[in-house]
Image (cartoon, rainbow, N blue to C red):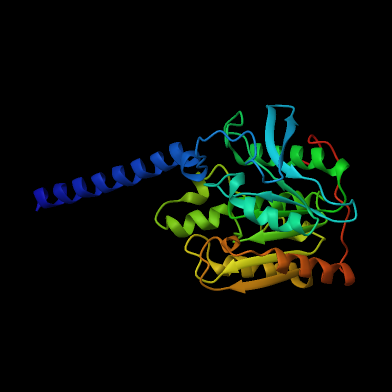
Amino acid sequence: MRKLKQAGLGVVAVLVAGYLAIGAYLYAEQRHLVFLPSGIPLTDPPAGSGFASLDVVEPSLGTLTDWWIPPASSALPTIVFFHGNGSDRRDFLAQGESFHRSGWGVVLASYRGYSGNPGSPTEAGLMDDARATLATVAPRVGPIIVWGHSLGSGVAVRMASEGRAGAVVLEAPYTSLTDVAAAQYPYVPVRWLLLDRFDSQSLIAKIRVPVLIFHSTDDPVIPFRMGRALADELGGRATLVQMNGLGHAPHTQDLSAQVIDWYARVRASSIPLAAASTASTAARR
């Protein structure tokens, strides 16, 4: 009996040690799991695309490189794309070209540690980079719409909550990165371990501008219910477009016509289209 008890305790000890080891590994490596830059340096835009390089100075870091096309007139909006964790600014190149054909301005934003930019990505760092991009662009254009896909949806939500955009497009958005991680690792206490939380749901109440949400019901990464939850909290300010069969990247289908039509409708409605703030990157953190 004593040997059985000792054997049982040994098994428990091994299981506990293994569980703690998994937790320690995830804690130590989490930023390598969350942020997945390709390592490919992207400086000059593709020839013939119409895009030009845009230098963005982030005071604590250096110079980031974005790609952009100004709008045909200051009356037309400029859409700023924030890509996902395993993507880069090429991900929205075709989508941006579609908007440009309608005269809209387009900014394909990037982050520290991505596409040859200096630094290492963190939640706070990405937010600083987004603020720097918007502060660079805002004085040169008219209305700004921020578009965030996947991880970038949290960046777009934060910028809108700080009054830095006149409207928002969220594609495959999450309530929080913590919720996504908890669903993927249900047996790990990720709510205690996660350093970068990207808590969009806590910021939703601060958004006072129209929001368009694209989410596919078969999204294997971020459940559709999260996009619906954000739409429910936004109430009348949100338009939720339920999609099917497009997985985690609805923008593989050209969405520009739907966005342009939505923008025309909200301009004609009572929902305010706020002017983007030109506050410095040091403000509203």
Q: Quadrant of residue 265?
A: bottom right
Q: Position of residue 91 (x, y in %)?
A: 58, 50
Question: Which residue appears at 50% of the width and 42% of the height?
Answer: 36
Q: Nearer the viewer, residue 223 or 183?
A: 223
Q: Nearer the viewer, residue 193 or 128?
A: 128
Q: Is residue 278 visible?
A: no
Q: Using the rendered image of the protein, determine whether residue 57 is visible from the camera's viewpoint.
A: yes
Quadrant of the rendered image containing residue 216? bottom right
243 left or right of 59 in image: left
Q: Residue at x 80, y 46 (%)?
A: 70
Rendered location of residue 183, percent (x, y): 47, 60
Residue drawn at 50 percent across, 39 percent down: 38
Q: Nearer the viewer, residue 92 or 160?
A: 92
**Side of 82 relative to 31 (left or right):** right
The furthest residue to the front: 48
187 sits left or right of 264 in the view? left
Q: Which quadrant does the C terminus fall into?
A: top right
